[in-house]
Image: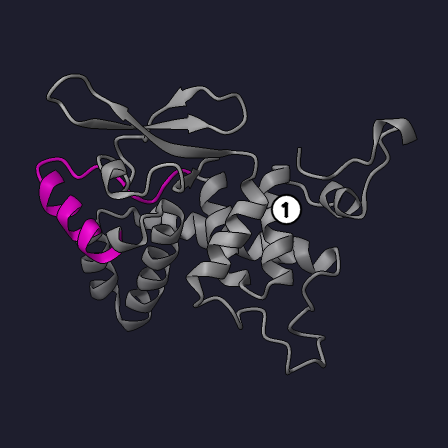
Amino acid sequence: QIGALGPHSEGLPLTPLGFHLAHMPMDVRTAKMLLYGALMRCLGPMLTIAACLSEKSPFVRTFGREEDVKTERDDAFGFTLSDHLAIVMAFQGWQEAREKSREAETEYCSIYGLARSKLQGIANLRHRYRRHLVDVGFVPDTKDSTDRAWDPDANSADPAILRCVLCAGLYPNVAQIQRRSGGKGSGTVSFLVSAGDHDVCSVHPGSLNAGKLQLMQANHGWLLYH
């Protein structure tokens, strides 16, 4: 499914992709996403997403402030229609706030309902995953590299490339948005169908996309999951 093995007739040998994935001590789809992130020069966001997929979400419940926090999150990240890209933006904002002061960091986490401990865990994993990429030769060691022109984040601000790399890594974990009549006088109902087994699935209530399927284009809209 992910292209790590050759044809059965040849004894299922490791492909070049499979060889590199075998040296990455993590979930194979996460590793594949990181390899493509390095190749497509959008490494920073992919490191953040990969670390978050391996940890619990930094977005936490804020008892008594749920509606206010949800509004703040939707205003800041909702336009992406992507929990993965929202994590990237939230993490970048946290780094910027932390550089200013401890008070700015605390305020930022409070506004968006973020757990500082989980964000720190993501930061630690990012360093570890980058080290793995250095070890397999996909990213130069910044201490030893003489290639100052190579920028691993040259395309990190391009959301189209980020979405492509996400899809390359997580495929075939994709679901298509479809619509059907909800019955007489009730209009249409949007739902998700998994591309792999064609099962009907649903968006997690904590997702930024919860309740937004009607806003997406039917039969041409796709969501990724891990």
Q: Which residues are magenta?
A: 56-77
Q: Is residue 120 visible?
A: yes
* Residue at (22% x, 57% y) in the render: 76
Q: Is residue 45 visible?
A: no
Residue 218 locus on image (x, y percent): 34, 37
Mark 1: which amino acid?
Lys
* Residue at (82% x, 36% y) in the render: 6
With respect to residue 134, does 71 lie above or below?
above
Residue closest to the far front: 184
Task: Give the image quarter of residue 38.
Answer: bottom right
The answer to whether 167 appears left or right of 87 in the picture is right
Residue 96 locus on image (x, y percent): 32, 68
Label 1 neighbour load within 10 Å: few <14, some 14-19, many 20+: many
With respect to residue 121, does 184 lie above or below?
above
* 186 or 174, nearer to the observer: 186
Residue to which mark 1 is pinned = 32
74 part of magenta stretch: yes
76 part of magenta stretch: yes
